[in-house]
Image (cartoon, rainbow, N blue to C red):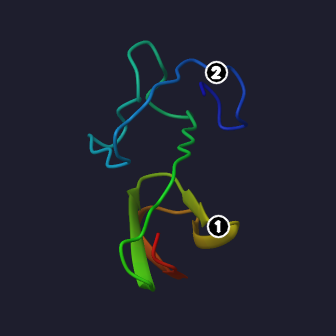
């Protein structure tokens, strides 16, 4: 989205994994503002084992990570943040 309030959708695409790396301040698509955009990823996780998993997000303007309707990372700042959740195999 071009704006931080999830308005003005500019791009949708399918990614094989959510592992996006880039330069801080770089927009997700050409023609978008370098600051003030919002990105949402939706996907599925199929754990191989029943155990506790750690998810990490490195970000420059805030991040929220939800898994199974549980908020595991909620940080409005800058940096690298992690959260854990116990998942069942398959």
Residue denoted by label 2 = 9
In the figure, is residue 30 to the left or right of 62? left
**Can you tell which of label 2 and label 1 is closer to the viewer?**
1
Residue denoted by label 1 = 68
Q: Is residue 80 visible?
A: no
Q: Is residue 49 above or below residue 10?
A: below
Q: Is residue 63 visible?
A: yes
Q: Is residue 11 above or below residue 5?
A: above
Query: Looking at the picture, how far across and down is residue 85, in whole percent?
Result: 53, 81
Local secondary structure at mark 1: loop
Q: Which one is nearer the viewer's eye here, 85 or 88? A: 88
Give the residue drawn at x 44%, y 63%.
46
Query: Looking at the picture, how far across and down is residue 69, in whole percent?
Result: 70, 66
Query: Looking at the picture, how far across and down is residue 16, in whole percent?
Result: 34, 39
Task: Of the two numbered discs 2 and 1 on the same chain, state the one appearing first in sequence.
Answer: 2
Q: Which one is nearer the viewer's eye here, 48 or 63? A: 48
Residue at the far front: name it.
90
Q: CA distance from mark 2 to mark 1?
A: 25 Å
Give the residue drawn at x 65%, y 37%.
4
In the figure, is residue 67 to the left or right of 14? right
The reply to whether the C-beta atoms of the residues labelled 2 and 1 are less than 8 Å apart is no
Local secondary structure at mark 2: loop
Q: Is residue 53 above or below residue 2?
A: below
Give the residue drawn at x 52%, y 23%.
12
Location of residue 39 (image quadrant): top right
Q: Is residue 64 above or below residue 20?
A: below
Give the residue drawn at x 72%, y 26%.
7
Location of residue 28 (image quadrant): top left
């Amino acid at each position: 989205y071009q704006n931080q309030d999830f308005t003005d959708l500019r791009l949708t695409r399918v990614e094989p994994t959510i592992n996006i790396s880039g330069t801080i301040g770089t927009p997700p698509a050409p023609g978008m503002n370098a600051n003030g955009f919002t990105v949402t990823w939706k996907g599925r996780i199929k754990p191989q084992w029943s155990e506790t998993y750690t998810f990490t997000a490195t970000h420059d303007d805030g991040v929220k990570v939800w898994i199974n309707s549980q908020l595991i990372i909620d940080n409005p700042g800058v940096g690298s943040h992690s959260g854990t959740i116990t998942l069942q195999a398959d």
